[in-house]
Every structure is written in C-alpha cells, then in structure tokens.
C-alpha cells in the first residue's frame, strides 16, 4: 500500500493511546473499605470471562479506530493487485513499453488495445505515485525519454503502436544503463508487455547477465510486470508470402501468394472477405477458411501493362487485433539473373554454367559468363546475382572486389582449385585434395534450412545420392551444411556480410564427384543462391519491421502506412515506402502471428533473485487500478467506534434491584 | 437519667419524646415478671374478659360468676387477660462491616440510634432491656433487667460498641435462642451480609423458642447503587481478601447478586414470620422507628 501523505504515518504510535489511557486509569485506582464483599466476590467471579473479553474488544476497537483515522488522513492508495504491487514510491520510475503488434490486441467489446490500456493504467498510477522522475523506454527507439508529467504518457509518440517486435532483454539493458549512468536512487521498473515468447527471448543468455547486473546495484530496484496475456478469442491474420509480376503477351498480372491464419478454438467454416489495394486501386475476393490456416498460391490480380513496379496492400476486416489484419507488399520487374563463373579450367565448370543459365522461372532470363581470374577488373559487379568461383581463393584487389560484392548482398560459391595454394579468404583456406578407395559417403546435411534444404513441396534433395570421389580439405571457422563421413565438410558457409559465401569441397568434374552428372542438387543450389542474389539486386524489398536501422529509414518516403508513426520510425511501422528508386514494404515478423505467451513460472524465473511482482490486467479494463481509499478507512473507523459504543453501553439498570 | 440522655450522642430527647407517644408492643404474648403493657400467655386480672371455664375445687371463690350460676345452675369461673412486661433483647452486629458508611453516618452509629431509642422506650414503659453485641461471637452480653441503673449500663454498652472482626451472627442468634429462657422480644440490628439460608435456621430457632423477633436490615445507599467512576480496590472490612475491579464491568453482576440476595432474604423472613425492616442508613431513623412502632401496634393481639 502506498500513501500520499506518508509522514502522517509517523503518528501511528498514537494507536497505543487507548492502551496507555487504560493503564493510567488502572494506576489511578481508589481504595475503599467495603462491607458488601459477598456480592462483589460473586460479581467478580461471574465477570471474569465475557467481561475480560469485552474489555479487550473495546480496547482493540479503539486502537483500530485510531489506526483507521491515521490511515485515512495519510491518503492511502490501493486498487486490486496493482495497488499492492505498487508498494512504495521510488525516486525514479522507469516504464518499459512493449509496442509490438501483439500489444494491439483488444478484448471483444472494447476499443482500447493492451498498449493503450497499459499506458492509461500507468498514467493513473504515476499520477498517484508522484515520483520525482519518470522515464519511458519503448521497444522502437530503445532510448530513455524523461517525462515532465505522467499525464503525457498516453499521448506520447513513444507509446503508440508499432509493427516491430519488442526485445524485452534489450529494454532492460537500456534501463540498466540508464540507472547506472544517471545514478538513479530507488528505482521502480514497470514492464508493460503481453509476455509473448518472441519478445522476451527467455532462452537468451542476456537474462542471466541482466539479473547479475541488476543485483549488483546497491540501491533498491523493483520490477513490476503489468502483464496482458493473450486470451483465446478468435483472431484472423493475413500475410503475403510471395509476390511476382508476370507479363505475357496478353496481359500483365500480379501473382500473389498469401496465408490466412485463424487463432482460437473456433474451427467452423468461415468466409473471409479479402480486400486488395494496388497503388490505390481496390479489388476484393472472399476466402473460405476451414481449420486454422489456408494458403492461397498465385492469386492473380490483373494490372496495367505499363505498371512495371508499385506497392500493394491486402487487408481483412478489423478484428480484435488490427495489427495483423493487413499486409503490405511491393513489386517490381524481376532483376536479371546474371552469374559470373571464374575458373582456370572452363571444362570443369560446364555443369555450373548450365545450372546458372537455365532459369527456374521461364519469365526470367538467366545468363552466365565465364572469365579468368585475371579478367575480373572489367566485370560489372553491380549486375551480378551470383559468382561461382573455381580457382584459387581471391587475394589482393580481387579479394576486395569479392568482399564488397558479398557485403552488398551478393552470393558467391567457391569450388576448390586443381592445386590449392594455401591462400586465405574470410578466414578459410583450401588444404589438400583427398580421396578414398571408393566414393566417400555423405554423413549428414541440413535439410531444414540453407541452400540444400527441402523443396517447398517438402521433398528432400537427393544429397545422399551424390558420389564424392575426391574432396579438398578446408580450414577455418565455417557453418557446415553437408558433412562427409569423417567430419570433413562438403558444403560450408563462411561468415560474411549481407550476402553469403558458400564453399563446396569438391567440383562438378566427374573425376571429383557426381555433382555434375547427378545435377539435381547442384541445380537447386545454384538456382537458390541466384534467387537470393537477385533479391539483393531487386529494387523492391520486403522488410520485417524493426530489422532495418532507423537511420536508414529517415529518408524513406511514405507511400502508404497504417500506424501513422513518426517518419523517423518508418522502419518500425508497417507500410509501403520509397527510398531513392527502391520500393520497400515493411511488415510484422512471422513470430508475431504465432506469438506464444510465456508461462508464469518461466517469467518469474527470469527475475529470480530480483524484487519482482506481477500484475495481470486485461485490455480495455475500465477498473481503475489505483484509487484513494481513505473513505474505506473512515468507514472502518466509524464502524469500530460504533462497535465500541455498543460494547460500552450499560446493560439495563440496577435500580430495580435496589428498590425496597 | 436525664443527665444520661443529654450526654448520649445516639439519643435525641426530642425524638424520644415524640416516639414515646407510641407504645412498643410485642406481637406475641410475653412472660414478664410484673404487670405491663403486653399480653401474657396466662390469665390475669386485667379488665379485658378472656373466657369462662368450669369451676374446679381450689379455685378462688371470688372469681365465680354467680349470674352464670343463676342461669345455668353450674359453677363457672370468669377469666380475664393478664398484662405483663417484656424482655427486650437488643442484638447489635458489631462486625467490621458495620463500620461502613458512605454518608454522615455509618451503620454502627445508625444501629446505636435505633438500639438506644428502642431501649429507652421499652424502659420507659416498664420493660426489661438487655443488649448483646455480636461479632465473631458474643462480644458483650447484658441480660434484660428493668431499672434506670441498668439502662445506663445498656447505653454504655451501646456507646462502646466498636465494629471489628468477622461476622458470626448466625451462631450468636442460635446461642441467644438457647440462653434466653423466657419469651423475649429480640431486635436484631445488622447488615446481614451472610447467606439467607443460614439466617433462616437461626430465625426458626428463635421462633421455636417463642421469641418475638424483629430485624433492622441496615444498608448503605452506595452498597445498593454501586456507583463508581474509576477503578477501585475494595478492601474487605472483615479482613477478607481485597478485590481490584473496574466497577463499570462488574456493576451489572453486582446488582444481580444483590437482587438475588434480597429476594432470598425476603423469602426467609416471610417463612420465618419475623418482623423485617430494611433501612438505608441515610433515612431518618425517627421515621423508621415510628413506622416500626405503628406497624407493631396494628398487629398486636396474637397470643
């Protein structure tokens, strides 16, 4: 419980007044010689039980009355569990706001989101607490913002909805730095969140260091979690999984794949109206949803042949979470899929050339160019999607060219040279060729992610069928996608910039492996890395909110936006943007659709050893969680006084007994 | 004797002169030594006709009713009531509790006034007066005699009575029942703070011995009202343990105990047929005695 006039509680010893008066009254007794002792003895014997109890009750009620009066004038605050959790007032109050899309959930019948409710509740609480300093840290800017008044909390731009996921450990790290740098005294840290597992990253090792660092503070740091856990009403969300512009001689159209997901316990057939907006032109369709999810592939939307690029938006009717009811996308003509083959021996890389030239999409033209390592200076690197390198690892100027190519998102696949030179690139170097008596079996490979993962239909690539007759040793730190028997890598990836640098430890030459003759794996690999490289070249980008630094988004021009956030925070708000000649679509992450709440025990475990309390609230809750309750104490005092008066009332009169 | 009356603090000559107009009468026949105002169980020579009875040889021939002989030809003797004096035994409780008094008088002083006045009135109408001071036993006993000098001794005894020690009034009354041989008028002045059941026995004993018993039950107004406004330590005046109490807590139960006691005592006096007079010691003793004397005058005649 917290008091607005706590200094008045210094008068609490006054509750001893009735006891002191009683004792004084006892001490100033009068002695009298008495004749009628037989009646007195009888009365005294009878009065021992109830009378003593009554006496104690009267004293207790008097003590309670004074205590209630003192509490009442001290203006206590309370209200549900929040009032209890509020405890005492700190010198600094830090408010950590989770602005993730899942905080936009509303309860049926309420127009207020979890985030708005949390801000309102905290505003009321802070107005009552009257802390010296309020600081807000939100999950978009991760920057402490001091508030002059708690009333500003609900109108703060830092407290508005965003589409980026929250990073709660990072919020706490910022809070820790603030407390440390500003030498804050007694600090109350309020975390407003829906406790979604993707926001909290409970498995992260940062939690341990956070616990240790907060425990190291000499001052009192108290954590309060204002939790808005997800309940299970039915909610629909929509997400675009693929957008392609297809132009034929007859028409131009957008082929859009999208997914409609339903959460909750309802499984009935549901007809969902879906509205499309392409550069302001709207169309609609209905989708029948049975079960929790439906995937629609290549839904065709005709567009003007002249419209080569643009943005679009798909939306469903607003439900309890408006943050996942729409999705933005941008489209553009596919970039050319140009592959550069760098080799000393063109006969070896013939299969590679074929794999690069045959496009998986008939509408997209793919080309491949073979050059010698010493001819690289004349290459237009900005037009390349993939570089296949079968030669000694690049050194000197060539190394810089390749590195910068990878840094801007380019893809490079290295194959070992005939004669390893021992040169190092990205911390890796070829050692020696090794061969066995027979083919070397492939032990393991990653089929769930990477360039040799399963196909979209779920079928695994026949990696195990490959026959490896000879391989070249590889030294250095790398991620292994396929491993030969004996632990040597077959396919590895070097740590690089935005792009990727893959290394095969054998070549498509029939003398080395069956990569060329059994070309399924090689073709899939090449086409996948070409597609990844082409995406980097594409002038339309699909971004996940929050994953682009805010600095980069400052220059973005808003084409369409839902949240209407600050222009400096465009990277955190879903919408369509233009940056120079690039089109950018920003949307929530996939994890937001799946957001699974952390269990209570798990959350409590994250704050083990810290002063932590949790308050559960519901979105749109109108019950004020903090209110002055002096009236309650006043009523309690009155009740105590009335009860005391009743107990003190003399029962009947003794005159009747004394009449003659 | 006039000199004595002037010096006795418990005697008021004006009260005595006013009360002298009302006789002190016994409710039961008394066996006195001389003629007096009180009825006797024997036939005597008063003017009040009692009955006829047959002549038996030896009867005084002067008492034959010759007119009855003329009418019935039988000898009848005419008998008259006898008047005699009485023996007044004043029993004063001198236990410690009689020293209590919340006003100008305490109980023993009030008892002195009643006893002294009754003694004087009895003596003036020719009755013998004795006094017994009772506390843990008989503290002092003066047998009943009829003489002015004896009355002075009675007054001295009353004046010297000091409240002290516990009460054994029941035993004292039993003892008096046995020691006073002839019928007497026994007046007990006490606060009777003892179980009524015990008192019942001694009253029955006195009645069995054909004594006329009158009780003056002295109570202080404070003992009835029990009005105190602060914690009190009550010290037993008869040497018992002290009690510390908050009067407001026990007042109700004290009142109930007192009420029950008075109710039981009333039942006892009704069953014992004793003359009971409850007196608060702030009352005027003259009025108390006047009512007492008048009531006895009205109930005279039992033989």
Image (cartoon, helix red, strand yellow):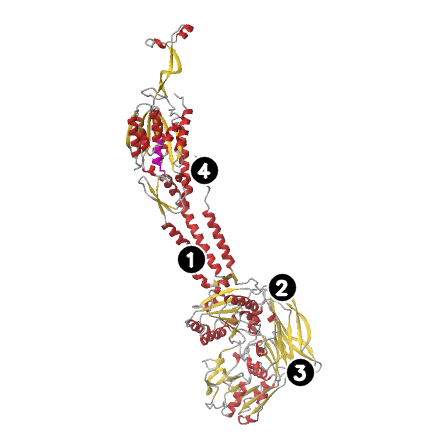
Q: In terms of depth relative to the viewer, which is nearer, A154 or A91?
A: A91
- Which circle, 3 or 4, is nearer the viewer? 4
Gap in angstroms between the C-alphas marked 1 and 4: 41 Å
Asked if disc 3 and disc 4 are in contact, CB closer than 8 Å, the reply is: no
Judged from the image, the secondary structure of the residue bearing numbered disc 4 is helix
Image x and y of residue A600, in percent: 49, 65
Residue A171 shows in this picture:
yes
- Are tags 3 and 1 found on a single chain? yes
Image x and y of residue A237, in percent: 60, 70
Judged from the image, the secondary structure of the residue bearing numbered disc 1 is helix
Q: Is residue A98 magenta?
A: no
Q: Which residues are magenta?
A: B105-114
- Which circle, 2 or 4, is nearer the viewer? 4
Is residue B131 found left or right of A421 in the rendered image? Answer: left
**N-terminal of the two: label 3 or label 1?**
1
Question: Which residue carries the number 2 mark?
Answer: A268
Question: Which residue carries the number 1 mark?
Answer: A14
Question: How packed is label 1: few (under 14 Cα within 10 Å), some, or many (20 or more)?
Answer: some
Question: How packed is label 4: few (under 14 Cα within 10 Å), some, or many (20 or more)?
Answer: few
Q: In terms of depth relative to the viewer, which is nearer, A467 or B253?
A: B253
Asked if disc 1 and disc 2 are in contact, CB closer than 8 Å, the reply is: no
Gap in angstroms between the C-alphas marked 2 and 3: 40 Å
**N-terminal of the two: label 1 or label 2?**
1
Q: In terms of depth relative to the viewer, which is nearer, A616 or A20?
A: A20
Gap in angstroms between the C-alphas marked 3 and 1: 84 Å
Q: Main secondary structure of the magenta part?
A: helix
Label of residue A308 in the image: 3
Q: Indicate the quadrant where residue B71 lies.
A: top left
**N-terminal of the two: label 1 or label 4?**
1
Label of residue B219 in the image: none
Question: Which residue carries the number 4 mark?
Answer: A656
Q: Is residue B111 magenta?
A: yes
């Amino acid at each position: 419980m917290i008091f607005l006039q706590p200094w008045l509680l210094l008068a609490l010893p006054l509750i001893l007044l009735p006891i002191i008066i009683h004792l004084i009254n006892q001490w100033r007794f009068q002695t009298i010689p008495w004749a009628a002792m037989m009646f007195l003895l009888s009365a005294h014997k009878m009065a021992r039980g109830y009378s003593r109890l009554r006496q104690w009750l009267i004293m207790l009620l008097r003590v309670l009355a004074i205590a209630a009066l003192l509490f009442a004038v001290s203006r206590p605050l309370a209200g549900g569990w929040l009032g209890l959790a509020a405890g005492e007032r700190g010198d600094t109050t830090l408010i950590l706001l989770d602005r993730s899309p899942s905080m936009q959930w509303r309860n049926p019948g309420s127009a207020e989101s979890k985030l708005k409710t949390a801000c309102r509740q905290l505003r009321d609480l802070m107005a009552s607490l009257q802390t010296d300093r309020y600081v807000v840290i939100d999950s978009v800017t991760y920057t402490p913002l001091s508030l002059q008044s708690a009333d500003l909390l609900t109108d703060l731009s830092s407290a508005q909805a965003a589409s980026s996921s929250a990073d709660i450990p990072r919020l706490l790290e910022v809070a820790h730095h603030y407390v440390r740098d500003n030498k804050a005294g007694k600090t109350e840290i309020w975390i407003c969140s829906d406790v979604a597992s993707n926001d909290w990253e409970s498995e992260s090792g940062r939690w341990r260091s956070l616990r240790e660092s907060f425990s190291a503070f000499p001052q009192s740091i108290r954590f309060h979690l204002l939790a808005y856990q997800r309940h299970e009403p039915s909610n629909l969300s929509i997400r675009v999984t693929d957008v392609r512009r297809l132009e034929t001689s007859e028409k131009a159209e957008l082929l859009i794949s999208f997914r409609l997901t339903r959460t909750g316990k309802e499984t009935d057939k549901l007809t969902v109206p879906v509205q499309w907006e392409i550069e302001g032109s709207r169309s609609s369709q209905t989708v029948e949803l049975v079960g929790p999810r439906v995937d629609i592939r290549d839904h065709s939307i005709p567009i003007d042949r002249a419209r080569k690029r643009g943005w679009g938006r798909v939306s469903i009717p607003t439900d309890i979470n408006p943050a996942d009811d729409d999705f933005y996308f941008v489209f553009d003509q596919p970039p050319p899929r140009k592959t550069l083959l760098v080799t000393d021996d063109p006969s070896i890389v013939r299969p590679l050339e074929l794999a690069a030239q045959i496009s998986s999409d008939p509408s997209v033209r793919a080309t491949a160019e073979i050059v010698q390592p010493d001819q690289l200076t004349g290459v237009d690197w900005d037009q390349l999607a993939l570089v296949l390198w079968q030669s000694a690892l690049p050194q000197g100027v060539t190394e810089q060219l390749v590195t910068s190519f990878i840094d801007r998102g380019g893809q490079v696949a290295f194959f070992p040279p005939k004669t390893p030179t021992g040169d190092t690139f990205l911390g890796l170097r070829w050692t020696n060729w090794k061969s066995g008596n027979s083919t070397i079996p492939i032990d393991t490979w990653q089929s769930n992610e990477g360039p040799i993962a399963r196909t979209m239909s779920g079928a695994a690539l026949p990696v195990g069928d490959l026959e490896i007759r000879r391989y070249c040793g590889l030294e250095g730190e790398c991620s292994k996608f396929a491993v030969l028997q004996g632990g040597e890598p077959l396919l590895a990836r070097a740590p690089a910039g935005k792009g990727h640098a893959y290394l095969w430890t054998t070549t498509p030459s029939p003398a080395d492996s069956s990569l060329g003759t059994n070309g399924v794996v090689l073709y899939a690999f090449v086409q996948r890395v070409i597609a990844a490289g082409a995406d980097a070249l594409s002038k339309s980008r699909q971004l996940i909110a929050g994953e682009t630094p805010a600095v980069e988004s400052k220059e973005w021009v808003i084409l369409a936006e839902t949240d209407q956030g600050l222009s400096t925070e465009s990277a955190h708000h879903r919408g369509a943007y233009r940056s120079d000649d690039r089109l950018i679509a920003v949307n929530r992450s996939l994890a937001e659709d799946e957001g699974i709440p952390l269990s209570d025990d798990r959350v409590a475990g994250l704050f083990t050893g810290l002063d932590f309390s949790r308050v559960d609230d519901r979105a749109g809750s109108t019950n004020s969680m903090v209110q002055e309750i002096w009236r309650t104490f006043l009523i309690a005092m009155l009740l105590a006084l009335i009860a005391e008066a009743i107990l003190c009332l003399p029962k009947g009169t003794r005159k009747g007994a004394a009449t003659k | 004797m006039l000199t004595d009356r002037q010096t006795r603090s418990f005697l008021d000559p004006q009260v005595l002169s006013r009360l002298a107009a009302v006789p002190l009468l016994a409710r039961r026949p008394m066996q006195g030594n001389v003629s007096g105002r009180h009825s006797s169980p024997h036939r005597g020579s008063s003017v009040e006709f009692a009955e006829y009875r047959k002549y038996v040889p030896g009867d005084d021939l002067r008492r034959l009713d010759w007119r009855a002989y003329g009418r019935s030809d039988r000898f009848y003797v005419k008998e008259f009531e006898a008047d005699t004096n009485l023996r007044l035994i004043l029993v004063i409780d001198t236990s410690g509790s009689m020293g209590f008094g919340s006003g100008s008088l305490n109980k023993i002083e009030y008892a002195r006034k009643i006893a002294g006045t009754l003694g004087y009135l009895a003596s003036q109408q020719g009755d013998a007066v004795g006094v017994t001071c009772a506390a843990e036993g008989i503290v002092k006993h003066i047998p009943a005699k009829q003489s002015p000098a004896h009355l002075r001794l009675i007054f001295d005894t009353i004046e010297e009575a000091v409240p002290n020690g516990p009460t054994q009034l029941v035993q004292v009354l039993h003892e008096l029942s046995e020691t006073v041989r002839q019928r007497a008028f026994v007046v007990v002045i006490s606060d009777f703070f003892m179980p009524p059941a015990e008192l019942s026995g001694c009253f029955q004993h006195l009645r069995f011995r054909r004594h006329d018993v009158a009780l003056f039950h002295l109570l202080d107004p404070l003992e009835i009202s029990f009005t105190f406004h602060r914690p009190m330590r009550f010290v037993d005046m008869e040497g018992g343990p002290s009690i510390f109490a908050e009067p407001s807590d026990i007042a109700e139960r004290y009142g109930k105990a007192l009420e029950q006691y008075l109710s039981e005592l009333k039942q006892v006096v009704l069953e014992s047929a004793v003359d009971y007079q409850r007196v608060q010691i702030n009352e005027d003793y003259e009025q108390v005695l006047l009512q007492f004397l008048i009531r006895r005058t009205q109930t005279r005649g039992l033989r």
